[in-house]
Structure formats: structure tokens, C-alpha cells
Image (spheres, rainbow, N blue to C red):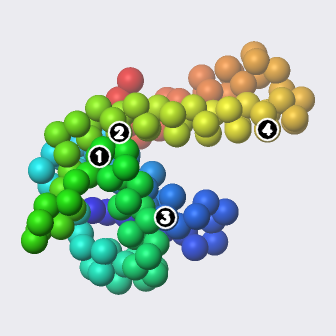
Amino acid sequence: MNIRVRPDSPVPIYEQILTQAVFAIANGDLPAGELLPSVRDLSAELVVNPNTVVRAYQELERLGMIAARRGLGMEVTAEAAKISRDRRKAIVLTRIREALREAAAAGLDADDVCQLVTAEWPKLNTSRK
């Protein structure tokens, strides 16, 4: 699992881990049946408190995206891809709303924002439409 955390971010570290795991599952980088790194391994890799990883894993489990496998660890569930795609849309919508509030506060109107999005979208290095 390729996760990077930014300790200087206003977003809590557990939430950064959670969001990146959701996106990795939605993108197919973490397929159903894949085992997640142990709490100890991931916390050592990210240099964070193990309780932070536990909190992210608990939220993923609560969402139905991972489940405990006795003696093996946490496994991505068969339903995780659909759940994560829905969750990913909700995360992106929240970010869009924040950006729109900021744009409105800066005096931009809907046409200005549409022009910015239209200009920036092709610059993304993505094959998804």
C-alpha cells in the first residue's frame, strides 16, 4: 500500500490514511482479498503512532471495506470497491464544495469557475473520463 502522510496538513493523519486507502481500493490498487499491512508495519513505515493506523483501519472496517482475518490481518472485502467508489465521490464532492465557497468568496462567478475547470482538466495526467 503506497500511502504518504503530511504531518503539517490540517487533515488528521488517520484521515489521510483512510482517504488514500479508499482511493486505492476504488482505483483497484487494493483489490478484494488483498491483505493490508499490519498496524505495526504501516505505523513504522509512515512514522506515526500505531493508534493512528488503528483508527484508520477501524473506520475502514466500520465502512465495510476491510474485515479481520484471524491470524492473517485485515483484508479488503468483496464489497469494498463499490463502497470506496461511493465514498470517493463523497470526498471529492466535499472538496469541490470547499473550492466553490472559496471561489465565491474571491468574487468568481460560475462562468469563471467553469472556465478554470475547463482549462485545468486537460492538464491532468489521467486516462479516466
Residue occupied by mark 1: 65
Question: In this picture, is 53 found above or below 35?
Answer: below
State which tag comes first along the sequence, 2 or 4: 2
Going from N to C along the chain, the mark reached first, 4 or 3, is: 3
Q: State the image quarter where residue 96 is shown.
A: top right
The reply, left or right, for residue 94 in relation to residue 34 is right
Residue 102, disc: 4
**For the N terminus, which image quadrant?**
bottom left
Tag 4: residue type?
Answer: Glu
Comes first in the chain, label 3 or label 1: 3
57 displayed left or right of 31: right
Secondary structure beneath dot 1 equals loop
What kind of residue is marked 1?
Answer: Met
Q: Label 3 to label 1, Cα distance in Å?
A: 16 Å
CA gap between label 2 and label 4 equals: 27 Å
Q: Are marks 1 and 2 in contact (CB under 8 Å)?
A: yes
Q: Looking at the image, is mark 4 or mark 1 earlier in the sequence? A: 1
In 3D space, how far apart are the residues under numbered discs 2 and 3 (Cα atoms)?
Answer: 17 Å
Q: Horizontal and vertical percent for residue 32? A: 16, 45
Which amino acid type is shown beneath numbered disc 2?
Ser
Q: Position of residue 59 (x, y in %)?
A: 41, 54
Circle 3 is placed at which residue position? 14
